[in-house]
Image (cartoon, coloured by chain):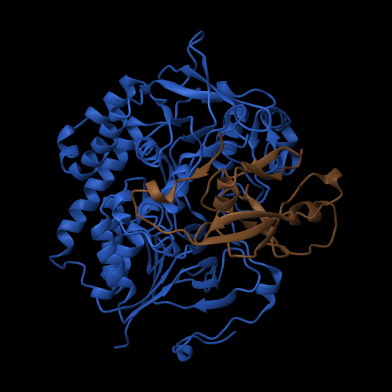
Amino acid sequence: MTTRHVVVVGAGPAGLAAAEAALAAGARVTLIDSADRPGGQYHRMLPEAYGAARPERLQHGWWAFDRRRRRVLTHPRCAWWPETSVWALERPDPTEPGVPRVHVVRGPADGGRRSRLRLDPDALVLAVGAHDRVLPFPGWELPGVFTAGAAQALAKGERVVVGDRVVVAGTGPFLLPVAASLLQAGSRVLEVLEANTAGTLARGWARRPWQLAAYGGKAGELAEYTALLLRHRVPCRVGRAVVEARGDGRVEEVVTARLRADWSVVPGTERTAPVDAVCVSHGFSPQLELPVAAGCTLRSAPGGEFVAVDDDQRTSCPNVYAAGEITGIAGAPAARAEGALAGWLAAGGVPDALALRPLRRSRDQGRAFAERLAGAHPIGAAWPEWLRPETVVCRCEEADYASLCRAAGNAASRGARVAKLETRAGLGPCQGRICGPTVAELSARLTGRPAERPAEGIPAAGPHHRPIAQPIRLGELAAAPEPLPGNTESHPSM
Amino acid sequence: MSPRRVRAESDAVGRQELPLRITVDGEPVDGIAGQTIAGVLLASGRLAWRRGRSGAPRGVFCGIGVCFDCLVTVGGERDVRACRRRAHDGDVVTTQNRQPEAGRATDPTERKHLGLPGEEDR
């Protein structure tokens, strides 16, 4: 029997665990990440050139991560491909599901002379993660308004703080580590605002408390952040949000307001505060273009759409597995458990191995945690009340709320595709990654219909359908793919 | 105040600084090895360097390569995500402008929309 080749996309907590388990099961692994160091967003590492003597100061669970990444990256059966972007997944036959061919470019981000390669693995593990979801509000396009993830990446990844008078706002426990990172980097955090009310939080978190005990590690981590905020006397307020950012060419002040449970503003509670930066996150959007390209079925959950997986982390596509935040927002411990299961099974490991039991248990606890998280930190239905006609909704094309309303009111442009061409929302460089879920939600509300009913023979417009998953330059595309080092015989050339 | 880099002397992670210099629209800007171009720009006090279709200023928003707000030209290569590209000593960075009236409709999407041949596409 030949060794199975497993390609793992994403080297965050889920991907690293997947690679480790696949290696343990005897497979040959190619681990791919767009960054030059492993860790993903959760374990984002400092650059090698920083020569950090005490990197553990910035990281939860650094030592376990450090051991794992060394084990995986130095393993003789593991090929570690950093700075590698999967720009397309090509299904062998669109009507017949199978493991897609993996098209990658390797080299500095968006560089024009990257090498193009193709992989034809026996199994694929997708662990590509998520990014912040940010709802629009007046002024959110001003420089100085960052996603919470950006502030975190800059502070953890290169020791740059975004400002010295910062408000951190939105919803979810992620706001706490972001505020903590800013404080540790010497920045002043004016306040941390959780948009959901105490009632919503209590109902979400207090339900079935015995389940939470199983997730003690995460609770401990959050308690540490809370203690740090207390030490720095940073007020944490619930039921309050940033509803506007103002400034001339950059953010200079924010307007915050008290919210009801549905996120409508309580009139008269607005306050302005001078700031030099705002960090916002209203949850996470899973990066679904690769799962969609592979042909994986999605499922709808309270927090949005995710990749549907079974108890073995299998997607609807044979030999394609998914792990981590793309299956549900459950945090790093769940991602690790999912990754380990996916990697082991993708490598052909026996599904009833004893060692899988604690992993399955941990994964199930993670799923329960995800459900609880989504319940405690929902996006309130009345948030569009923050919008004004001139508020930018699509950042790339600067399509405003008024243009979306006009398109929705015009019967001819109600279809998602027509509305897109008319408003240009979603047509810019980010390809709807930032505004996609928002535009879909607003359009559905404005037209009173959930989704487009396309003409016969045309598939429904999917917000995650991006056949070119990452930018590739025409010169790179035109160049012939390079042969793979060592294993050319198993990879027929074009 | 503006974004800044934590001072190495007081940084709990105990790190070194290997200086590098890039130019931005011809102006020299100092950073350290390992920083992204976005990090160098931010730490030099620049909060915005790109202009949107209306001419509105843009800089970093998502910081992890998703939003494409921070695009710059590096050594003649357009549309490089500054938050994902590590800076190298001597990098020649030029800023980008999507305003059609700026007479520089060089954005691929825009060029396509205006019926111009794409110089680089995605």
| x then y, percent, for residue B61 | 56, 43
Look at 61% across and 26% down and name the residue there: A138
Q: Nearer the viewer, residue A72 or B89?
A: B89
Chain letter, colour blue in render: A
| x then y, percent, for residue A354 | 12, 65
Q: Nearer the viewer, residue A332 or B102?
A: B102
Residue with the most extreme left position: A354
Q: Quadrant of the C terminus of chain A?
A: bottom right
Look at 50% across and 22% down and name the residue there: A382
| x then y, percent, for residue A128 | 43, 58
**Side of A277 relative to B13 (left or right):** right
Q: Nearer the viewer, residue B21 or A351?
A: B21
Q: Quadrant of residue A342?
A: bottom left
Look at 28% across and 75% down and name the residue there: A23
Chain letter, colour brown in render: B
Residue with the most extreme bottom position: A489
**Side of A53 relative to A355 (left or right):** right
Tell me, yes or no, if residue B86 can be seen here.
Answer: no
Q: Quadrant of residue B120?
A: bottom right
Question: Image height check: is B24 above or below A217?
Answer: below
Residue with the most extreme front position: B9
Q: Quadrant of the N terminus of chain A?
A: bottom left
**Side of A471 relative to A204 (left or right):** right
Q: How many callouts does the rendering have? A: 0
Look at 42% across and 16% down and name the residue there: A260
Tell me, yes or no, if residue A414 can be seen here.
Answer: yes
Question: Image height check: is A278 above or below A32?
Answer: above
Question: Image height check: is A291 above or below A405?
Answer: below
| x then y, percent, for residue A466 | 59, 57
Q: Quadrant of residue A181?
A: top left
